[in-house]
Image (cartoon, rainbow, N blue to C red):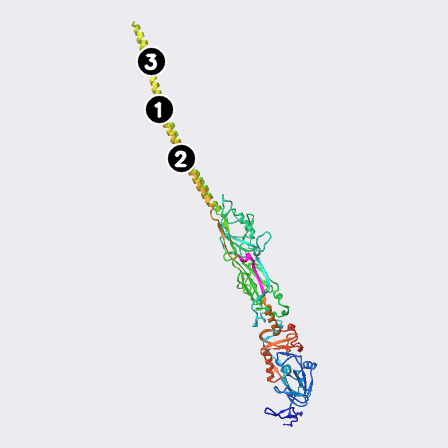
Amino acid sequence: MFTRYCGNYTKGKGANAVNQFQDLPTEKSFGHEFDYAVWTANTTVTLANVPWNSDYRDLVRFDNRAALDNYLDTAAGPIISTTGTTYAAMGRPIALDIPHSRANRFNYLRATNPAQPISGGDTGQAFYYFITDVQYVAPNTTRFMLQLDVWQTFGHDVSFGNCYIERGHIGIANEESFKDNGREYLTQPEGLDMGGEYQIVDQWRRDIASARNKVPGDIGSYSILVTSTVDLTAAPSDENGPRLVSARGSDMENLPNGATSYVFTTLAHFKQFLSAFADKPWVTQGIISIMAIPFTGTYDVGSTSTMVAGVSILEVDPGSLRVRKEVMKEDWRDNLPIPERYAGLHKLKTYPYCVLEMTSYTGTPLVLKPESWCDPDGTVIEVPHFAQPGPRIMFYPYRYNAATLQNSTPAMDPVTDDSGVVNDGGEFLDMATGITNFPTFSLVNNGYMSFMASNHNAIAYQHSSADWAQQRALGGNQLPAEQATGAIGTSQDINQQGMSAARQSTNLANETGAFRAIQGMANSAIGGISGVANGQPGAAVGAIGGMANAAVGNAIDVNQRNQSLGISNTLAAGTNRAATDQMGYVRDTNKAYGDWAAKGDYQNVIAGINAKVQDAKLIQPTTAGQVGGDAFNLATNKWGYDIKVKMLQPASLNSIGEYWLRYGYSINRFGRMPENFMVMSKFTYWKLRETYISSSECPETFKQALRGIFEKGVTVWKNPTDIGNIDIADNTAIAGVTL
């Protein structure tokens, strides 16, 4: 039934005038009840000034309405009681009896009417409004434009369901946010400007060798691996009796090799070896490789030690080399140099806000995401391979990108004990850097010494051949001389025999003449005797004369024969002497010439041998091994690897840090907001993409308004006096919050 209106009515004037009720009747016969749109008579209006506003960027979550009312009552402005019913619908102004100058001081209004219950028999409710505008009406009347504060009015009457959270402080407050090093919750991209470059905030160094780091008594902290086709441990003798023993082969790292590998643990030992074998090039010429490797004591490449020229040489043992694990930084995640202001922002420990760069300075650095390294101590595995071909040493982060944090201790191969590492469940050697081009060196062999040693027997043979040729020539000269001497002696003997025969013939003739003279004398004597006997005295004289005549004739004949013999012998002796002198001259000159020629030939051969030896001194020295590889790092800096901890430049770090302190992390997953909407001690930011309200006691319009508040992003404060007044870093996470 319609009842009579008892309120004041004002008729508008002018073209735009409208008729309007200034107030509604006080009688309840109209059926009006106190609510957010209609204030019944005796409604109490409280003006106040609050730090939150109608754009809903900030909300205050009071524990209950009583706490809100208490806050408003504590610092309330004037309290006004209406005398009639007033419309407070959205977009409709209300007039209150308060001077405009005073009304300008307030931005908030509370309307209560405890005397009149609302529908359903519930107790009275207060309604809260933002004062969006204040207009002067009369000296003692001011018109207020109001907007219902949906949050404070209906916030306690709404229950939120499982919502899709796009961003908020719950990412910071979540006690499990750093689960799995942050991979579970903190790897959501933010789309924030990180600046143009990182800066190095820490560096973990690992040196395995260097030519600059001197060790007392040593030249450099690296070793030398020598591969040789000659057994370096065999006695080499000297150039007068060089001895060469072929290499026995090796199976370094289980790889067959006909050559033998030796290790000089220090460069000083290798130089001592070179000095000792400088005059034994027939040994060093068998060296086919000289390579610098990291200090062998680190990787146990050999254990069989042999002393050669006072130097201890290691013969490389068979089998794989021993790998090594290096703990770079214990609990490194807890020691990242994050500014204290942002210490609670664990997302700064993840990529791309923090990056680990592992580099061996060979142009192959590794970019490591901190959250993907499933090792709390930054363990690096060093895998050496020094045997030919393709020697190298590789370094990889242990269990990088592994699915879990289990097995944080490197798993060693049970077959080889701790000499090898099996696949660690992570990227293994697919995420590795290393040194893949070891420097190699050469040594110089004395070409002259090598020639002399290799031709020692040949030169000795040539000397012996020259001596024999000379002796044979001299012997050949001596034989004709001796034969000529024999011929001369024979000729002289024959001449003597002829002269002796002539002498004997003369003697025989003389004897024969003497015998005939004697015979004649005898005959004469016999004739004289006969004449005497016959009485011829003259016969005796004649006999005597005949005897004398016979003797004289014989003497003449003997003299003649002797003279003839002398002449003949003299001629024969002179002729023989002239002939033998000529023969002696020919003999002597032939022998002298033969001896001279033999000596000249010998000297010429010896000169040829000596010339060959002298020429050998000019033979160019030969080299063993080869020159190559990359020695730059070893010579100028070091061998090894560094892990550089890189974070954002301060400007970008501060910008992102402040943003996260204010608005939290990107979440992008479903979750439930706590009943009081607070996960931080001072304020909590929420931005939802889908807001589900499971129950509410308000019209759909306000329900959608509440949904819109959270989907555009809103900060819920615990204490209204903190809004805009506190340092946003002074906002700690509440314990026990999970997402």
Distance CA(mark 1)–CA(mark 2)? 32 Å
Q: Residues within 10 Å of mark 1 (few under 14, many from 20)?
A: some
Q: Residues within 10 Å of mark 3 (few under 14, many from 20)?
A: few
Q: Residues within 10 Å of mark 2 (few under 14, many from 20)?
A: some
Distance CA(mark 3)–CA(mark 1)? 30 Å
**Does 581 sit above or below residue 359?**
above
For label 1, the SS is helix
Q: Earlier in the sequence, mark 1 or mark 2?
A: 1
Q: Which residues are magenta?
A: 631-645
Residue 552: image tag = 3
Q: Is residue 374 visible?
A: no
Q: Quadrant of the C terminus?
A: bottom right
Confirm whether the magenta stretch covers residue 644.
Answer: yes
Identify which residue, 351 or 398, lies in the foreground. Answer: 351
For label 2, the SS is helix
Res 702 → quadrant: bottom right
Which residue was labeled with disc 2? 594
